[in-house]
Amino acid sequence: MAEKKQIVILGGSYSGVSTAHSVLKHVLPSLPDSSAYAVVLISASSQSMCRPACPRALISDDYFNQDKLFVSIPKQFEQYKSNFRFINGTVTELHHEQRTLSVSVADAVEQLSYYALVIATGASTFSPLFGFNRDEAFLRASWTAFRAALPAARSIVIAGGGPTGVETAGELGEHLNGRAGWFSSTLANPKVAVTLVSAGDNLLPNLRPALAQKAERYLAKVGVTVIKNARVKNVSPQGSTNQEGGTFSGPGVDDVAAKATLSLDNGSTMDADLYIPAFGTRPNTSFIKASSLLASDRRVNTNESTLRVDAAGPRVYAVGDVGSYAKPAIHQILAAIPVVTANIKRDLLADAGQTLAGEDRVFKEDTRETQMIPIGKSKGVGAAMGYKLPSFMVWLIKGRDYWLWTTGNLWSGKQWAKEG
């Protein structure tokens, strides 16, 4: 495909897979000579997964149908007979001035040119338990090690008061301790001490305080103790990282099952049989060496309206958690795919000598309070488009299977059958 004009998409998760389907369905057929173009999707993993399900999935494979939780990326694109290539590799460097990429594939480095580029590499977590920090094999090995250590654990500390930390604490609390009765506000004598450490005055800073306080009450009913206004400063042995963002070498499989002594910035120390850092993500942008392309938080500096990466030259875009145009959230990704697709189409047609009427498609971030947090198997807190949701609705929409019911159409491309 080297002689074709390559539309290269980096990343095999929600943003990358969705963009690839949308371009194949709606952009290529609109071009004067679609056979002159090829879509190339590059991913370090050959599988996609429902990443939001990790707080429950890390406990046991029994909670989810594994054939739905993990899906083969190449299989999802077999429907396209031509003009598509999948590369199971890692991008090591972007040369935006030369419009080429260095891609590590099976111990070799391939130089790949691009005609258009979509950066959809997402972000990695500080713990390997919560997604493809490397690939599916590393994630599964991390789960195996964690599960092997879990039965003997008598103290678990989770750092981070955001959605991942709260959901993980709720899942582990109920799995290990059960749930307090209807008339009890806390679970008496939990079998395992599960502690959630949060830097803020309240948990879940993107939700109103009343919902955060309700989440704390639900956690108490599954035996979780919450410590607020405290950060984990140091972890000994230093296998992973700290919440202050010090040197990060990346935790290995052994680290997820290792005992740890934690030093908090309030002067206290804690011993943990298992320690889980769940306090944020790092943008997957290490392959971008040019500081001019990155925002201060190392996300790609993206035009917040058009989703183009203006400083990278023509026909370069960013979408998903790696882009600076919106706060990371799945609903923001779903809203961005039609925008980036429309502007790719506009740019490719213009370069082919055709001009679409009207203006660029514009993205507008939805800043309304929208977040749903399951807490255990039957409870949850959340809001959608600024409206508070009852616990039952959070369970019905997300808590039953952590969005797994939504991913089939997304991975297969059926969600993008109509041009948005």
Image: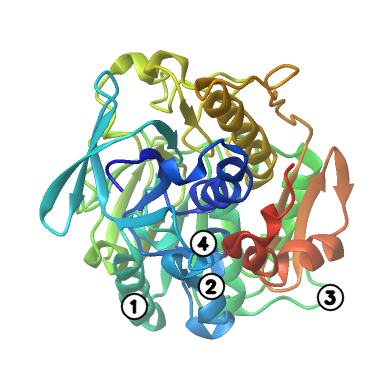
In screen coordinates, is 235 left or right of 354? left
Q: Earlier in the sequence, mark 2 or mark 1?
A: 2
Q: Dot 4: within a 10 Å radius of its alpha carbon, few (fewer than 14), some, or many (20 or more) residues? A: few
Please tell me whether mark 4 or mark 3 is closer to you in this view: 4
Considering only order in the chain, which callout, 3 or 4, is on the residue closer to the N terminus? 4
| Mark 3 secondary-structure assignment | loop
**Residue drawn at the location 55% of the way across and 53% of the way down:** 164
Q: Nearer the viewer, mark 2 or mark 4?
A: 4
Q: Is residue 207 left or right of residue 118?
A: right
The residue labelled by disc 1 is 144
Q: Report, in whole angstroms, how far the alpha carbon at label 4 lies from the one at label 1.
A: 36 Å
What amino acid type should be assigned to the residue bearing mark 2? Leu
Residue that carries the numbered disc 4 in the rendered image: 80
Residue 295 image position (x, y, % from top left): 42, 19
For the point 26% across and 49% down, which residue is it?
Answer: 90
Would you say residue 189 is visible in this rendering?
Answer: no
Q: CA distance from mark 2 to mark 1?
A: 16 Å
Type of the residue with mark 1 = Thr
Query: Mark 1, residues whose alpha carbon is within 10 Å: few (<14), some, or many (≥20)?
Result: some
| Residue tagged 2 | 69
Residue 63: give x, y in percent of width and height: 58, 81
Asked if 321 appears above or below 76 in the picture, the reply is above
Label 1: state its secondary structure. Answer: helix
